[in-house]
Image (tube, rainbow, N blue to C red):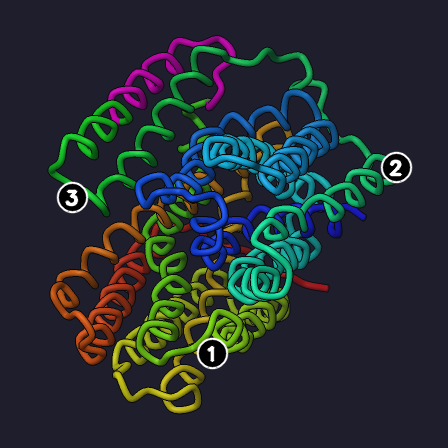
Amino acid sequence: MAVLAACVGQFVVILDVSVINVALPSIRSGLSIGEGSLQWVVNAYVITFAGFLLLGGRTSDLFGRKKVFLLGLGVFTAASLLGGVAQSPWMLIVARALQGVGAAVLSPATLTILTTTFPEGSGRVKAVAAWTAVGTGGGAAGGLIGGLLTDYLSWRWVLLINVPLGLVVIVASAVWLSENRSGEAAARRLDLPGAVLATLGVGSLAFGISQSEAHGWSSARALVPLLAGVAALVAFVAVERRAREPLTPLGIFRVRSVSVANVITVISGMAFYAMWYFLSLYMQNVLGYSAVETGLALLPHTASIILSAQLAPRIMRLVEGRALLALAGLLTAAGFFWQSAMGADGTFLGTLLGPGIAFSFGAGLMMTLLAVFATSGVGPSESGLVAGLANTSRTMGGALGLSVLASVAASRTAGAGGDLEALAAGYGRAFLVSGVIIVVSMLAIVFLPRSRQTSG
């Protein structure tokens, strides 16, 4: 039950990052939202999700994994209902922001449930592999699910679909999921100054990054929140040094598996979470696929990620963790470089299938291994914290990568108009840079501690 609850919770969190994109044109016409406000349907979720992740992760340590899981899922489900019945743009944007808060509480709790249920070893690797596969599959399947719901029902069902699913999981988890909270954690109090500064810092950085794509990195709209975020995080470190019961004990970063895995996650995440975006644009803007056809074309990618994540525990019995992570990185980078050769006359079999399977299989392995490394070497009382850190690193890397790679693609497609070859070249350049990013992230693997090969 623990694995099922954690996987379903992570699935709906990641699904809502991508599923809304396909429905945006219908939302714009349905609620008469202007282009400037439309981006906030996406940004409101991403910013609050990133901003509250550290706090969400720590609360599961302090107040119990089961309670926090149910709270996060309850907020997320209620916010989905509010968004699904929204009658005005502001109501939908508020609902999306509340969804982000609920997701930030829920997502670290899903990983924490697994790391506290299963001790380090093959059992935990298998559980994390399932969590990675289902969560990443949610991101990949978002286009198809969003397209089907929007085309055959309404854009509102992109949000409303979470309600029955959430209610079923809430009831099942309340009955069958057991609480797991250490006495040491239960005696602690929440570090409110640290929580405020961490939320403000990460949220401001996420907001600044989101503004850079539309206004440029040197614009006041991007620079002011970016600098404010950096200042808040510097203040956060100063407060945590003196706090008796810090939100984030800085000593956690002396655990090499945690610190190095998070560095790799930030860097590699810049490539992972932009790949669906550019593939969708290429299929729809260049190849002329519909939203549903695009989702169907991404199914092999989803299957490859699920397969590789499920195979990870078995492969780790034979190959040491760092070596396997390096091999996975090489496969992922090779797939990105292969995909960068896309052209205007591309086909599913000749252009998308081969490289897609390669980088998706490698990405599934990488994300599973990074999650295992990032949550190892710490006690149960810190498991929520490291889960929150891992999710924050993944989210911030994805937000930064999308902004940077969008600029890279735009530098080639600017003024292209209807020139499909120029559009394809721009998207291809984004994949080329993604491959370079993965190679750079691999340089840090040598600093990871050697992992024990799993058994059983």
Give the SS element for disc 3. loop
Give the SS element for disc 2. helix
> Which quadrant of the figure has residue 420?
bottom left
Residue range (magenta): 230-248
**The disc labelled 3 sits on which kind of residue?**
Gly
Q: Is residue 22 left or right of residue 71?
A: left
> Which quadrant of the figure has residue 129?
bottom right
Q: CA distance from mark 2 to mark 1?
A: 39 Å
Q: Residue at x 54, y 59 (%)?
A: 136
Classified by dominant secondary structure, the portion drawn in magenta counts as helix
- Up/down of 303 relative to 60, above or below: below
Tell whether position 238 is magenta. yes
Give the SS element for disc 1. helix
Please say if the residues under marks 1 and 3 sit with CB atoms less than 8 Å apart. no
**The disc labelled 1 sits on which kind of residue?**
Ile
Decide which of 228, 305 is in the foreground and name it.
228
- Tell me the tag on residue 175: 2
Give the mark, 2 or 1, whose residue is nearer the N terminus: 2
Q: Position of residue 124 (x, y in %)?
A: 66, 52
* Residue position marked by numbered label 3 in the rendering: 216
- Up/down of 159 relative to 411, above or below: above
